[in-house]
Image: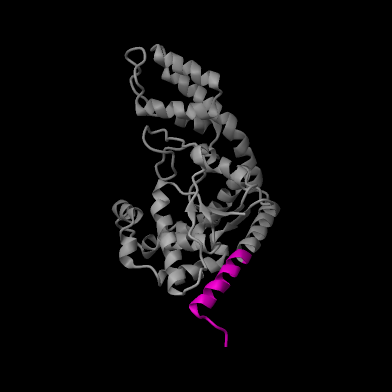
Amino acid sequence: MKTVLSGIRSTGHLHLGNYFGALRNFTQLQHQAKCYFFIADLHSLTTHPKPDDFHSNVRIILSEYLASGLDPEKSTLFVQSSVPEVSELFVLLNMLTYKGELERTASFKDKVRQNPQNVNAGLLTYPVLMAADILVHRADWVPVGKDQEQHLEITRLLARRFNKIYNTPVFPEPEAYNFGGNLVKIPGLDGTGKMGKSEGNGIYLVDDEKTITKKVMRAVTDSGPQTPGSPMSQEIVNLFTILSVVSDPQTTAYFKDQYNNCTIRYGDLKKQLAADICKHTLPIKERIEEIYHDDTYLKYVIEKGTAEARASAQATMQLVREAVGFKAF
C-alpha cells in the first residue's frame, strides 16, 4: 500500500478551493492508501503568529479537516510539532543542504520581495523542513501544487543525497500526486489566479451566509458581452468555473445561454452562485463548530494520530541514526 502525506499551515482557514480541490479527493484516497494529514504549525512560525492565536489556529484547521470528511479511523491526523522526530530529521538534513540551493528557490525569492523586513532563517530552510515532513514517513506520494513542485524536487534530491552519502537506501524518492483529471481548481473572486489564503480572494468553510453573499456580490466582473457569442473575460470564466462546481448543470447552462444572447445580469448570476455555495458550505460550517467545541473528540483524534505518526517517524529515525553512525554507549 502506498503512503501519502499532505500538510497545511496552521494560519488561516480552509477555503472553497481546498474543499473542492484536494480535500474531496483525500476523503476517497484515505480508503486506498496509508494517509498522513498534518497541521504544519512549525512552518507557520516563519510569520510569527501571536501565542494567543497559535493553539486556536491549530484547533480550527483540525476541526475543518474532520468536518470535510477526513476520518481518523482511516487516516492519521496529527500536529507537526507533536512529532519531535521531524525536527531531528530537519537538523540532519540541513547538514546535507547547501545555502545556494535554498537561495535559488522561487518561494524564498518571493518571500524576500514580499516581506524584506522578515527574512528569517526559517524562510530559507523551509524546503528542508518540508523534506523532513515527507521523508520521516518515507512517503511515496505527495500532493503538491505548482508553487511546491520545486520543494518536492529538493526533497527528492536530499533523499538521494542521504542514501548515497551513507550508502544505504533509507529514503524512497517521493513522487508528486496530482489526482489526475479529478482535481478541481477553484479560481479566486478577484478575477485572477486560484483561490488562496494569502491572496484574500477566497470563500472559507467557516464563512456564514451573509459573509459568503457579500464576497460573491463583490466578485470582479466586466461590462458584459457586447455581441452574441462574445468570448468571456477571465473574470467571467472564473465565475462560471465556480458555478459549474457548486450548481446543477441546468443552472450553469441557463446562465451560459443568457451570456451568449447578451441578456445576462451579473447580479442575478452572483445571487445564484452565492446561494449554491451556501448549500455546500453551511452544513460543513455547522459541523466545524460542533467539532471545534468537542474537547473529548479532538483529544481522541490527536492522541490517536500522534501515536501513529510517532511510531512511523521513530521507525524511520532508527534507520537514519544507524546510517549516520549514532550509537549508544
- Which residue in the rendered view is the most extreme toward the bottom? 329
Disc tally is: 0
Residue 69 in sight in this render: yes
Residue drawn at x 38%, y 37% is 193
Image quadrant occupied by the C terminus: bottom right
Residue drawn at x 61%, y 51% is 33
Residue drawn at x 54%, y 77% is 322
Provide the major secondary structure of the magenta segment.
helix
What is the span of residues highlighted in magenta in the rendered image?
Answer: 311-329
Q: Picture quarter containing residue 78?
A: bottom right
Residue drawn at x 45%, y 25% is 240
- Closer to us: 61 or 258: 258
Residue 37 in sight in this render: no
Position of residue 125 relative to residue 192, above or below, is below
- Closer to us: 140 or 22: 140
Q: Picture quarter containing residue 76?
A: bottom right
Give the percent coordinates (x, y) of residue 61. 56, 49
Q: Picture quarter containing residue 227?
A: top left
Q: Is residue 106 left or right of residue 174?
A: left
Position of residue 103 relative to residue 71, above or below, is below
Position of residue 269 relative to residue 177, above or below, is above
